[in-house]
Image: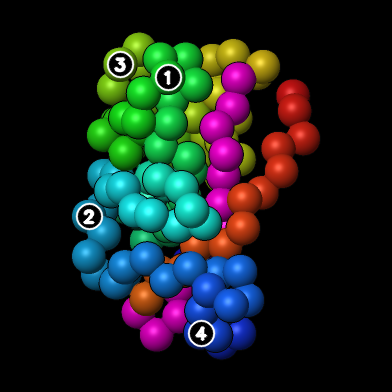
Amino acid sequence: MASTPAAAEGAEDGWNPVCAFVALPVERGVTALAQGTAVALFRTYDDQVYALGNHDPLTRTGVLAKGIVGTRGGVPFVASPVHRKAFDLRTGRCLDDPHVSVPSYPVRIVDGTVYVGPRLTFRGP
């Protein structure tokens, strides 16, 4: 869990406040609006928070926040509730098909508030 005072400036510096950290359930996802799009936020058992695009590219539905959170080989992931394909929570890369990915977003926690930053660029397999 990162904490950076600069993030407290809010949306004007590219970081959107989305919710209180304590509002995030452990090992489950929630949907929030950040960066002008629906993102799926996940809080893992070790209190790390990740943000991915909520849109599943394989089914073209907004369901990733409803997925199953787990780890595979030390990689935190969410499995789509529709087809069970796993997406790396850190990068958005599909663990089952390296040619598929979802957008990932950096997350900061400042004074108990979760901030989501601009979309990260995935560099492929």
> CB of mark 1 within 8 Å of CB of mark 3?
no
Q: Which residue is mark 4?
A: 8
Q: Tell me the kind of residue under disc 4.
A: Ala
Left or right relative to 70: residue 4:
right
Q: Which residue is mark 1?
A: 60
Q: Which residue is mark 2?
A: 25
Between tags 1 and 3, which lies in front? Answer: 1
**Nearer-N-terminus badge (1/3):** 1
Q: Tell me the kind of residue under disc 2.
A: Pro
> How far from the left and from the top, in percent, is residue 114?
40, 69
Mark 4 to mark 2: distance in Å? 23 Å
Left or right relative to 103: residue 47:
left
**Nearer-N-terminus badge (3/2):** 2
Residue at position x 38%, y 54% in the image: 33
Element under disc 2: loop
- Residue 21 falls inside the magenta stretch: no
Mark 3 to mark 2: distance in Å? 21 Å
**Nearer-N-terminus badge (4/2):** 4
Q: Which residue is mark 3?
A: 82
Label 2 crowd bin: few (<14), some (14–19), many (20+), radius 10 Å: some
**Nearer-N-terminus badge (3/4):** 4
> Quick check: 85 above or below 7?
above
> How far from the left and from the top, in percent, is residue 67?
30, 31
Left or right relative to 44: residue 52:
right
**Nearer-N-terminus badge (1/4):** 4
Q: Tell me the kind of residue under disc 3.
A: Val
Element under disc 1: loop
Residue at position x 41%, y 37% in the image: 54
